[in-house]
Image (cartoon, helix red, strand yellow):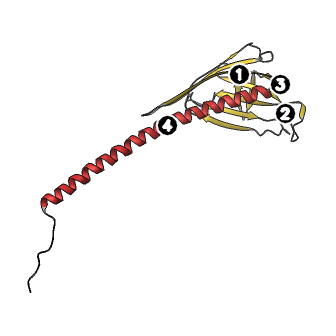
C-alpha cells in the first residue's frame, strides 16, 4: 500500500493569511476607534443640551408659580443667597388638593452650588413647607457648569418681576461638548 502525501499549507500561504488577518484587524480597530470618538462627542453634546434644557424648564416652571423672589434661604444647614449665580423663587405652598396654604411658602433655588469647592456644580433645590404637596429635594443638574448669570429688573427681590439668564455647560475631554442657553422668566403668580 502506498501512502498519499498529506495536504499542508506552504510557508508562503501561511504568511499571506497572517498578513490578511493583520490588515483586517487594523481596519476593524480603526472603525472601532472612530465610532468610539463619535459616541463620546455625541454623548457630551447630548448631556450638555439635556442639562441646559432641564434648567431652563425648571426656571420657567418656577417663574410661573412664584409670587416673588427671596433674598436668601437656609436649606439643610446651608445659606443660599440670591445673586448673579443663584436665583431663589418664592411660591405659595399648596396642599394635596393643590389649594393654597395661607401664609406658607415653598422655595425653588437654581444656580451654582455655593458649598462646592469646584464651582462647576449646577443645582436645583425645592424647599417645601410642612404640609405642602411639593417634596423637598436637591438635584444636581450638572457638574460641568462653565458659567451662569442671572440679571434682575430690580435689586429688591420683593419688587423684581423679570429675570434674565445665561447658562453654559461644557463637557471637556478628547471630544468636548458645550451648550449655552439664554432666556428670561417673568413672575406671573402675583
Please report contact status of discs 1 and 2: CB closer than 8 Å, yes or no.
Answer: no
Number of residues whose C-alpha sits closer than 10 Å to that of mark 3, classed few (under 14), some (14–19) or many (20 or more): few
* Circle nearer the N terminus (1, 3): 1
State the residue at coordinates (23%, 53%).
Answer: 20
Q: Which residue is mark 4?
A: 42
* Circle nearer the N terminus (1, 2): 1
Q: Is residue 183 above or below residue 29?
A: above
Q: Quadrant of residue 98?
A: top right
Horizontal side of 170 relative to 3 (left or right) equals: right
Q: Which residue is mark 1?
A: 82
Horizontal side of 29 relative to 71 (left or right) equals: left
Work out how far the residue at label 4 is from the one at label 3, CA to CA, in angstroms: 39 Å
Residue 181: mark: none
Can you give x and y, in whole percent of width and height, for residue 86 in the image?
A: 67, 24
User: Which residue extends farthest bottom?
Assistant: 1
Work out how far the residue at label 1 is from the one at label 3, CA to CA, in angstroms: 20 Å
Can you give x and y, in whole percent of width and height, for residue 151 in the image?
A: 68, 16
* Circle nearer the N terminus (3, 2): 2
Amino acid at each position: 500500500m502506498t501512502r498519499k502525501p498529506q495536504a499542508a499549507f506552504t510557508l508562503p500561504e501561511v504568511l499571506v493569511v497572517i498578513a490578511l488577518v493583520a490588515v483586517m484587524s487594523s481596519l476593524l480597530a480603526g472603525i472601532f476607534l472612530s465610532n468610539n470618538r463619535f459616541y463620546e462627542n455625541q454623548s457630551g453634546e447630548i448631556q450638555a443640551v439635556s442639562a441646559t434644557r432641564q434648567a431652563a424648564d425648571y426656571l420657567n416652571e418656577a417663574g410661573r408659580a412664584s409670587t416673588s423672589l427671596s433674598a436668601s434661604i437656609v436649606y439643610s444647614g446651608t445659606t443660599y443667597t440670591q445673586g448673579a449665580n443663584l436665583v431663589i423663587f418664592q411660591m405659595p405652598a399648596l396642599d394635596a388638593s393643590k389649594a393654597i396654604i395661607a401664609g406658607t411658602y415653598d422655595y425653588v433655588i437654581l444656580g451654582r452650588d455655593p458649598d462646592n469647592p469646584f464651582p462647576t456644580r449646577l443645582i436645583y433645590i425645592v424647599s417645601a413647607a410642612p404640609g405642602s404637596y411639593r417634596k423637598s429635594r436637591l438635584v444636581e443638574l450638572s457638574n460641568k457648569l462653565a458659567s451662569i448669570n442671572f440679571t434682575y429688573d430690580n435689586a429688591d427681590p420683593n419688587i423684581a418681576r423679570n429675570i434674565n439668564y445665561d447658562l453654559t455647560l461644557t463637557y471637556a475631554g478628547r471630544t468636548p461638548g458645550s451648550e449655552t442657553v439664554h432666556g428670561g422668566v417673568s413672575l406671573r403668580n402675583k
